[in-house]
């Protein structure tokens, strides 16, 4: 009688343990895997991040265009650099082709965002040229200084923002933090520091050529020009803050728009 009760107790214990424990090929017990763990995720299902959504969208674009794709649930071999480049270009094309699904405001923000921030950089270059000309008392060759300092910052900022923020964001390679940091960095460097340096060099050469300001004493060139242009540098702090905030805010808006596009493409 005691033997039968003991066997029944062991059988019930085995059923209880089997609910949370399985046996491997070597006989060691391991916990059962949850359906919500990363190892049991369905093929092609993203966790919500921009990079994983871009991978899913690119994979669906590959299958639609007739490309062969093999998806692994847990172990996946590293793709070749050429395959990564083609996948990024294909994802960018899919994002550009599906912009029409969003509102016109989002389309304008995503498409013409580099031009907006480039226009702000052009205005900062114009302002920097005016301030440095006033500090150095330069009145000659106004056309030759205002036109380059309005056009060059516009082109450099628009191109740099396009290649460093918009294109990597469309391919799903940037997180929100990296996107905001890149947008602020491009706006500050190409929209403030670059035109300010150009304005200082161009107007400094004209000031030395036409002797509108006293020449620096020997061995104190840096101190002389720093004191001379101190007021202009202080006034450029205000547009620098505005330009940096605008660049980061524009990058944030483009990241949200890109997330919406990937969500739409996932549910197609």
Image (tube, rainbow, N blue to C red):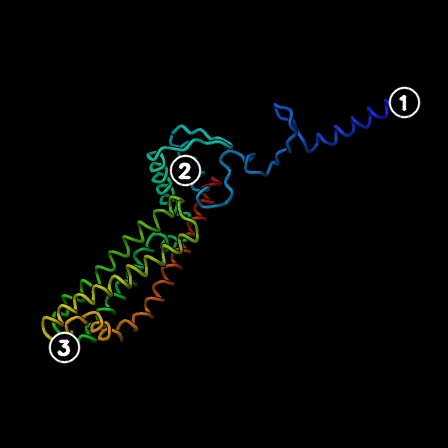
- Mark identifier at residue 58: 2
Which callout, 1 or 2, points to the residue nearer the camera?
1
User: Helix, strand or loop at disc 2?
Assistant: helix
Q: Which of marks 3 and 1 is nearer the N terminus?
A: 1
Displayed quadrant of residue 125 = bottom left
- Compared across the picture, whether 78 is left or right of 131 comes to right
Q: Where is residue 14 in the image (x, y as percent from the top left)?
A: 75, 28
What residue did someone put label 3 on?
214
- Mark identifier at residue 1: 1
- Compared across the picture, whether 20 is left or right of 179 comes to right
- Compared across the picture, whether 183 is left or right of 70 comes to left
- Mark identifier at residue 17: none
Q: Which of marks 2 and 3 is nearer the N terminus?
A: 2
Q: In this view, does 181 lie above or below 132?
A: above
* Residue at (43% x, 53% y) in the render: 177
Q: Is residue 235 above or below residue 25?
A: below
In space, the residues marked 1 and 2 are separated at their CA atoms by 67 Å
User: Helix, strand or loop at disc 3?
Assistant: loop
For label 3, count other residues whose C-alpha is less than 10 Å away and answer few (under 14), some (14-19) or many (20+).
few
In space, the residues marked 3 and 1 are separated at their CA atoms by 115 Å
Q: Is residue 71 above or below residue 173?
A: above
Q: Where is residue 60 in the image (x, y as percent from the top left)?
A: 43, 35
């Amino acid at each position: 009688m005691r033997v039968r009760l003991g066997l029944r107790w062991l059988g019930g214990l085995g059923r209880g343990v089997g609910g949370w424990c399985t046996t491997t090929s070597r006989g060691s017990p391991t916990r059962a895997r949850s359906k919500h763990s990363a190892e049991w995720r369905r093929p092609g299902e993203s966790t919500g991040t921009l990079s994983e959504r871009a991978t899913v969208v690119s994979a669906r674009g590959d299958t639609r265009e007739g490309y062969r794709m093999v998806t692994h649930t847990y172990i996946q071999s590293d793709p070749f650099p050429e395959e990564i480049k083609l996948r990024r270009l294909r994802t960018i094309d899919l994002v550009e082709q599906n912009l029409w699904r969003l509102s016109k405001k989002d389309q304008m923000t995503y498409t013409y965002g580099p031009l907006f921030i480039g226009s702000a950089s052009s205005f900062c270059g114009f302002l920097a040229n005016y301030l440095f000309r006033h500090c150095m008392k330069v009145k000659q060759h106004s056309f030759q200084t205002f036109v380059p300092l309005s056009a060059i910052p516009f082109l450099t900022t628009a191109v740099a923002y396009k290649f460093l923020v918009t294109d990597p964001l469309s391919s799903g390679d940037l997180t929100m933090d990296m996107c905001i940091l890149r947008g602020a960095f491009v706006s500050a460097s190409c929209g403030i520091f670059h035109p300010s340096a150009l304005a200082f060099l161009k107007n400094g050469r004209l000031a030395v050529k036409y002797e509108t300001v006293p020449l620096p004493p020997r061995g104190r060139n840096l101190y002389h020009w720093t004191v001379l242009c101190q007021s202009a540098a202080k006034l450029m702090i205000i547009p620098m803050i505005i330009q940096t905030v605008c660049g980061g805010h524009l990058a944030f808006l483009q990241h949200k728009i890109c997330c919406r596009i990937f969500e739409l493409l996932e549910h197609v």
